[in-house]
Amino acid sequence: MASKMLRGRFKGGISPVLLGFSSSLDTDKEMFFEDVWGSEAHVLMLAKQGIIPAGDAGKILKALGDVKKEYSAGKFELDEAFEDVHINIENYVISKCGIEYGGRMHTARSRNDQVLTDTKLHLRKELLEVMGCVLELEESLLCLADQNADAIMPGYTHMQHAQPITFGFWASSYASMLLRDFDRLSGAYAHDNTCPLGAGALSGTSFPIDREYTAKLLGFDGVHVHALDAVSSRDHVLEALSALSILMCDLSKLAEEFVLWSSCEFGFIEFSDSFATGSSIMPQKKNPDMAELVRGKTGRVYGALMQVLTLMKGLPGGYNRDMQEDRELLWDALYVVKGSLQVLNAGLSDAKINRARMSESVYADFSTATELANYLVKEKGIAFRKAYEITGGVVKELSSRKKDLRDTSEVIAFLKKSGVTASSDALSEILDPGKAASRNKSLGGTAPAEVRRMVKELRNDAEAKEAGLKKRIEKVESAKKLTQQAVKEMI
Ligand code: ARG
């Protein structure tokens, strides 16, 4: 049955059709504890400022403590009759303490600043977890990079063999990418972690509130000062979804390479049986569903970003009920991203890297052709474009005879036609893919020594990021303790 709360100016109750349609309980559930924390901070502030008597605050805080316990024990259920989590909890407090006391909790507050506070607190918690998962996957990639810094494989452009690289080079490229994802999430965190509480419905309040104090109790880095801007804002949601979308783009690329490389044509990598799936009809199948699902679920996160962008684009300033739609999408995106990071990390840590297959595939190709051209430039003083043409001619001749660059005597013969003499020893050195990769020692290149150096540097960067993440987590934890200590003293 619909409640009478918020019905003062109406003749009758709300239509059950509208009540069901407008309920946000499904997504509010996720931020139940954040809503209580926000109310605790608000009530502590009201009492500190003398806006409500300390005794009344104590009663409200006791009821808030009870609702947390009952909810955790499964004894308190959110009731559809009360629209959302805010009204459910306020109703609980009023029914516990009576309207004379409980009815003071919502002084100098609106659901507009309240819902935003809850969302920001919950998103903050989720972002911290996602950032932790990014660093874990990054570390797994760096371990693989370290172990396989000299494992030769083909490097691709246009999905065609291009130049030899090492598996460590490939793995560390994703680690390097993920650190930027971390930075983007960290930027979204900074905008998320400002406190909107105290903005009221849209214009602040005539009560002498202390916004800095509530922000401190809730562990925010500062106050989102402008009241109208605060209640109108969901750009932190957009920023988080953008960062999550770009992260999923990167994970989806990684997943795509896993799908290709675990195929029988490539065979570069094999997932353990526990990270593979079978077929209902073909007994031999070993499928990389894990990677395919990461690739597939990416669309859900992009979709969430597009939906919230569309949701926000035509809204006038101030709170609009449309905004309630942001959470379902945001929570789902966070769920997908966390799951994707965890499954890729677990699958990767268990995977077998097939060095022999990778190296076999790079030897039977023309991927050291650039090195041959470079040799002509370095040792024979030929201009690069000319050297490129000579080498192209060599490749043309070889491939028409179904040969490759391993056939040094053929290479010598074709070079001779262009007036270049080269010894077999020199060519074997130049055309060997492993040696070629080792020569790419330029900053950021694929040479094993450079890969190992980059791994160290990336690890240092990740360690600094991890320390920053730990500080943020500690700040949130100590704010929780601070609030609970103040609640205890007030009760
Ligand atoms: N359930 C609402 C939401 O999720 C809470 C805020 C309602 N505010 C209002 N003015 N009706 O956005």
Image: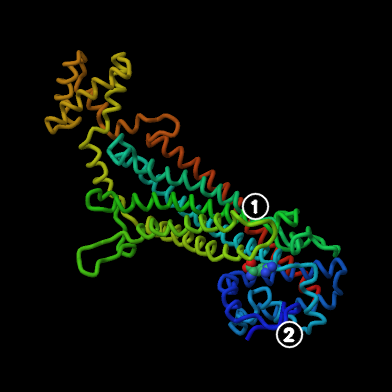
Q: Is residue 292 left or right of residue 126?
A: left
Left or right: 109 with respect to 476?
right
Mark 2 and mark 1 in contact? Answer it, CB < 8 Å.
Answer: no
- As drawn, the label of residue 271 is none
Quadrant position of residue 351 = bottom left
**Residue under the image location 74 percent in, 71 percent down:** 40
- Up the image or down, 352 lies above or below 377; here it is below
Q: Which mark is residue 95?
A: 2
Rendered position, 96 above or below 46: below
Residue at mark 1: C-beta within 8 A of ligand 1: no
Classify 10 Å Cα crowding around label 1: few (below 14), some (14-19), many (20 and above). Answer: some
* Residue with the mark numbered 1: 191
Q: Residue at x 26, y 53 (%)?
A: 263
Q: Position of residue 413 (x, y in %)?
A: 14, 20
Where is residue 340, by image quadrant? bottom left
Image quarter hosting the C terminus: bottom right
- Amino acid carrying label 2: it is Ser
